[in-house]
Image (cartoon, rainbow, N blue to C red):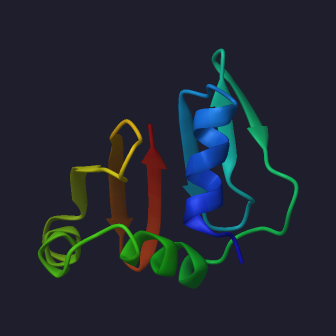
Amino acid sequence: MYHLEHLLALLTAEKATELQFRAGSPPMVVSENERHPLQGPPTSNEDLMKLLRSLTSSRQMRNLRESGVVRFVYALPDRSPFLVHATMENENIAFDIS
């Protein structure tokens, strides 16, 4: 399982523009308009849901279930804020962090 704190640290350290999460593949790092998969196992829809829940409030998760999309800013102490964009179609979830 991937740990969100490590992934966000990687995003910052690599000066990447985005992390992309899709079920069936490992997270992708986008840097200089090129996507590169991280070394590691593919994520399941359940894995993605756990990662996303660690970022969101219950209200944001409810908005995602109801409208199929949610965008919000996620901030950690001593780091620049991240923009999160999540979509849901049926039970499949995908999200990006930039």
Residue furthest out toward the top:
32
Q: Measuring 56% from the left and 50% from the top, which residue is drawn there?
A: 8
Residue 31 percent coordinates (x, y): 66, 24
Q: Residue furthest front?
A: 78
Of the pair 40 and 46, the residue shown nearer to us: 40
Q: Give the answer, above or below, for where 58 lies relative to 14.
A: below
Image-based side of 6 in relation to 84, left or right:
right
For image coordinates 34% across by 58% down, the residue present is 87
Tell me the quarter of the picture where residue 7 sits. bottom right
* Snapshot quadrant of residue 52: bottom left
- Tally of numbered tags: 0
Q: Position of residue 67 (x, y in %)?
A: 15, 65
Q: Position of residue 4 (x, y in %)?
A: 56, 64
User: In the displayed structure, does residue 12 sit left or right of residue 58?
Assistant: right
The correct choice, above or below, for 76 with respect to 80 in the image is: below
Q: Is residue 60 above or below residue 7?
A: below
Q: Position of residue 55 (x, y in %)?
A: 36, 67
Residue 14 is left or right of residue 65, and the answer is: right
Residue 40 as seen in the image, left or right of residue 44: right
The residue lying at 63 percent from left, 69 percent from top is 3
- Using the rendered view, name the quadrant where residue 44 is placed: bottom right
57 or 23, nearer to the observer: 57
Identity of the residue drawn at 54% across and 27% down: 17
Where 29 falls versus 27 (above or below)?
A: above
* Quarter occupied by the C terminus: top left
The residue positioned farthest toward the right in the image shown: 39
**Quadrant location of the N terminus in the rendered image:** bottom right
